[in-house]
Image (tube, rainbow, N blue to C red):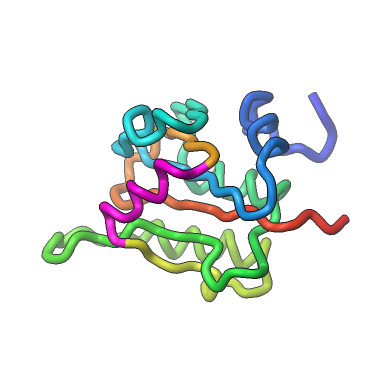
Amino acid sequence: MLKGIPHILSPELLKVLCEMGHSDRIVIGDGNFPAESVGKNCKVVRMDGHGVPELLEAILTVMPLDEYVEHPVSLMEVMKGDPVKTPIWDTYKEIIAKHDARGAKAVGTIERFQFYKEASEAYAIVTTGESAVYANVMLQKGVVKD
């Protein structure tokens, strides 16, 4: 165990976060996200049994968001005509606001199939047991200035 590190961050995930450099991206996928097929060319970290909000909170505790891009946080857009509601996005924006002064302005959306394409180029994908739909989030790492 380590002091100051959220307990939910496994040694494997901590290693991945340490390996990432400025502008590298990490996806936190919901339970339906095709992490293994989309992530066949990147690292896939399994965090089954955990939800996206708790992992987002923990990751942002140790990893800054990129200050040099308008939207260092990307959400998967709901498909046109899909009647799904996404209240989990409000939870994400609250979490992000605790860790980045831009708050909700740091968050953008990406069309579903473009999200998959960009996710396939991410440094890593974390797969979760999150049951909310359209709960996928992509984070772009910033510079650690401490």
Q: Main secondary structure of the magenta part?
A: helix
Which percent across, then down, holds residue 33?
Answer: 33, 38
The residues colored magenta run 111-122
Query: Is 88 placed above or below 130 here?
Result: below
7 left or right, relative to 105: right
48 within the magenta span: no
Instruction: Locate the C terminus and report the quarter of the image it occupies.
Output: bottom right
Q: What residue sits 31% from the left and 34% below the top? A: 34
Quadrant in the rendering for residue 29: top left
Q: Nearer the viewer, residue 124 or 130?
A: 124
Q: Position of residue 98 (x, y in %)?
A: 66, 63
Residue at (38, 65) in percent of width and height: 109
Q: Is residue 84 left or right of residue 106?
A: left
Residue drawn at the location 31% of the way across and 52% of the way down: 134
Quadrant housing residue 75: bottom left
Percent of width and height locating residue 69:
58, 69
Query: Which image quadrant for residue 54?
Result: top right
Which residue is rendered at x = 69% and y = 46% of the image? 21
In the image, 29 versus 125, the foreground residue is 125
Residue farthest right in this picture: 146
Residue 59 position within the rendered picture, expressed as x and y whole percent measured from the top left: 63, 45
Along the line of sight, which residue is nearer the eye, 104 or 22?
A: 22
Quarter in which the N terminus is drawn: top right
